[in-house]
């Protein structure tokens, strides 16, 4: 398939945007099997700057399902400001600004923050698929769900973690 040429670039970029939007939607609605179909069979992830890396569709789906299917866990992932570049070899790269929030009532925890996703996409006979996705945090804060009290704060600009002990 060739997504380039007269009008093709715009259509290909829109298809990649729709793919990433579906990724966030399926993630938050916990439709992990459908989310897995957005990846190539040999897709990879590098969440948390590679600390949580997975290879292959099955491993990616298993990790996400295990991490986000606990009792009462809800998530919100929004991707903004896509910078998508098409390449002549039928691939594309994209950078997305992420804002996310994860609520884990059983652990009395809320995680919120921002990050930059860096993705690689490939055009297949079935359409565009994610070959690689991963993010590096800009900042992350953890708070108690019950009180809103800050547990920890970390930022790519501040190497040391700030914890509740630091606040008395």
Image (cartoon, rainbow, N blue to C red):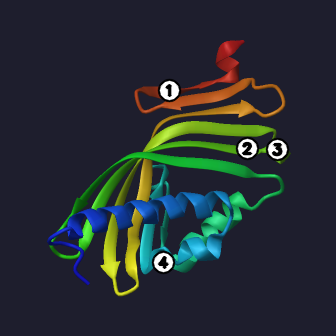
Spatial CA distance of label 3 from label 4 is 30 Å
Nearer the observer: mark 4 or 2; the answer is 2
Mark 2 residue element: strand
Mark 3 residue element: helix
Q: Which residue is mark 4?
A: 56
Q: Which residue is mark 1?
A: 160
Nearer-N-terminus badge (4/2): 4
* Residue at 30%, 62% in the rendered image: 13
Say which mark, if any, is on residue 20.
none
Nearer the observer: mark 1 or 4; the answer is 4
Say which mark, if any, is on residue 105.
3
Nearer-N-terminus badge (1/4): 4
Nearer-N-terminus badge (1/2): 2
Mark 4 residue element: loop
Q: Position of residue 16 (x, y in %)?
A: 37, 64
Nearer-N-terminus badge (1/3): 3
């Amino acid at each position: 398939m060739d997504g380039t040429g007269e009008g093709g670039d715009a259509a290909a970029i829109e298809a990649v945007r729709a793919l990433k939007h579906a990724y966030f939607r399926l993630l938050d609605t916990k439709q992990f099997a459908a989310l897995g179909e957005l990846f190539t069979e040999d897709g990879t992830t590098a969440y948390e700057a590679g600390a949580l890396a997975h290879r292959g569709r099955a491993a990616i789906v298993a990790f996400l399902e295990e991490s986000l299917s606990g009792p009462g866990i809800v998530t919100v992932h929004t991707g903004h400001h896509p910078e998508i570049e098409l390449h002549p070899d039928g691939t594309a790269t994209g950078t997305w600004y992420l804002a996310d929030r994860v609520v884990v009532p059983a652990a009395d925890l809320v995680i919120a923050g921002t990050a930059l996703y860096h993705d690689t996409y490939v055009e297949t006979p079935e359409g565009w698929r994610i070959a690689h996705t991963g993010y590096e945090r800009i900042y992350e804060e953890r708070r108690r769900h019950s009180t809103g009290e800050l547990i920890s704060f970390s930022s790519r600009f501040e190497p040391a973690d700030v914890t509740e002990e630091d606040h008395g």
